[in-house]
Image (tube, rainbow, N blue to C red):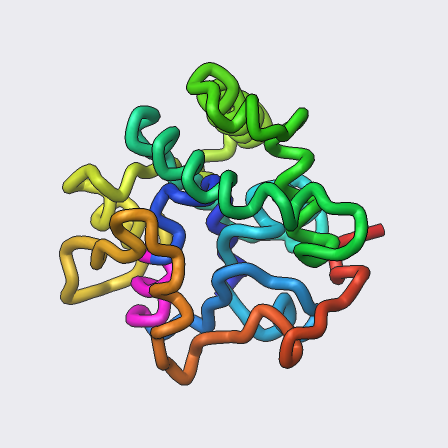
Amino acid sequence: MSKIFIIGLPRTGTTSVCHAFLEFGIATAHTAYTSYCFENATAIADTPVFNDYRALDSHYPGAKFIYLAREKTPWVASIRQLLLRMHTNLTRPDGGFNIHIKRCYLTTFTDLSIDNINQDDYLTKCYNTHLANAREYFKHRSNDYLEIDIAKPQSFAQLTAFLDIKSERTDFEKMNIGGKVTAWNDIKHPLKIDSTAKGRIDKHLPYMR
């Protein structure tokens, strides 16, 4: 099976979709920071793919890209909560998050600051820009690109049809509800691929030049 990249922004249902892929029997990583992870996971979501999908498209011919959309009002509230928690470790010069997390968030959420995070217009603009860029990049490539909102009842069927997968399920299991972001850590599955090598990352990922 070709690589599958879930390129929706954080807080759009990436954990629920990754869990579905595990149930499909697909090796899956929710975030990926090592060459081993990219080599062994078939489906990868979140960081760094939401920022690096163009480079991934060039490096992995035939890959499929799934954009997770979400109604803006609940997304803005959810991403604000996440970014407020992450802000210090994203912006501190002496440590904090790993280089890939910092690079991707600070590129996608340009001019990140506490003041901007608290502005609906800023967060909405980041969302709209990200979605518009993905649509422009993948225009005329319906065989490679799918856009779904997992809150919509037809989204699960759209995903399985896009990937030509048979499943007894008819909907996604809703996870990470109410601002929680730890559901992926609690999942135990033999096809779950670790994002790091016992906490260590690779500075250069396979698709980076």
- Residue 65 drawn at (x, y percent): 49, 46
- For this orientation, the residue located farthest to the right is 209
- Which of the 4 quarters of the picture holds residue 24? bottom left
Residue 134 vs residue 70, the one in the foreground: 70
Taking the image as drawn, is residue 146 in sight?
no
- Residue 115 drawn at (x, y percent): 56, 23
Q: Is residue 169 magenta?
A: no
Residue 95 vs residue 58, the one in the foreground: 95
Question: Eyeballing the image, is 82 above or below 42?
Answer: above
Residue 1 vs residue 129, the one in the foreground: 129
Question: Eyeballing the image, is 140 above or below 143?
Answer: above
Magenta stretch secondary structure, dominant: helix
Q: Which residues are magenta?
A: 16-24
Which residue lies at the image location 44% right of the left edge and 34% below the top edge?
Answer: 80
Residue 80 vs residue 53, the one in the foreground: 80
- Residue 160 drawn at (x, y percent): 28, 54
Q: Is residue 50 left or right of residue 9?
A: right
- Residue 42 drawn at (x, y percent): 51, 66
- For this orientation, the residue located farthest to the top is 121
Taking the image as drawn, is residue 10 in sight?
yes
Question: Eyeballing the image, is 207 above or below 81?
Answer: below
Which residue lies at the image location 28% right of the left edge and 50% below the top edge?
Answer: 161
Which residue lies at the image location 85% right of the left edge and 51% below the top edge?
Answer: 209
Which residue lies at the image location 35% right of the left edge and 70% below the top edge?
Answer: 22
The total of numbered circles placed on residues is: 0
- For this orientation, the residue located farthest to the bottom is 190
- Which of the 4 quarters of the picture holds residue 134? top right
Q: Is residue 4 left or right of residue 163?
A: right
Q: Is residue 104 left or right of residue 162?
A: right
